Amino acid sequence: MQIPIEFFTDMETWHIKSLDDGEWVDIPCKEIKQVFELLFESAGRPAKMEVFTQQQMRSLHCEWVAYFSPATVKVVKAAGASPCAQPSSEWS
């Protein structure tokens, strides 16, 4: 059996998705949470399957983003997140 290379790449890659500014952030957060909870439970609640949200300050406004750990491949696809570097362990 041949396993696609994307399988290995996705299992090592963090992802990010902009959620919007603070006023409307609840809508995409609820949608991501619903997908995550369903997939998290069906996968047996793996410890490395995590989604984090963080407020990032910009020059004139703030933006909320969601970071997806490498174990959240199916959630990433459903959310339409983009690859990124591993986030800092210092959460604001």
Image (tube, helix red, strand yellow):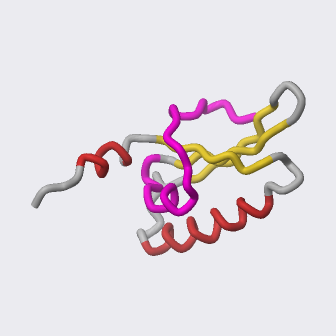
Residue 34: image location, x then y, percent: 63, 71
Q: What is the tally of numbered marks visible in this picture?
A: 0
Residue 19: image location, x then y, percent: 72, 50
For the residue pair 32 and 43, the one nearer the viewer reads as: 32
Q: Residue at left 49%, top 69%?
A: 39
Q: Residue at left 67%, top 67%?
A: 31
Relative placement, left or right, of 15 versus 62 is left
Q: Is residue 11 above or below residue 24?
A: above
Relative placement, left or right, of 29 versus 5 is right
For the residue pair 13 and 89, the one nearer the viewer reads as: 13
For the residue pair 76 and 89, the one nearer the viewer reads as: 76
Is 78 included in the stretch rendered in magenta?
A: yes
Is 88 included in the stretch rendered in magenta?
A: yes
Work out which residue is located at the far left of the displayed protein and give it.
Answer: 1
Q: Residue at left 53%, top 44%?
A: 82
Viewport quadrant of the N terminus: bottom left
Relative placement, left or right, of 74 versus 9 is right
Residue 42: image location, x then y, percent: 44, 74
Residue 79: image location, x then y, percent: 57, 59
Magenta segment, which residues?
A: 70-92
Work out which residue is located at the far top of the displayed protein and give it.
Answer: 59
Q: Is residue 42 above or below residue 86?
A: below
Q: Residue at left 56%, top 65%?
A: 36
For the residue pair 44 and 25, the one nearer the viewer reads as: 25
Relative placement, left or right, of 70 versus 60 is left
Viewport quadrant of the C terminus: top right
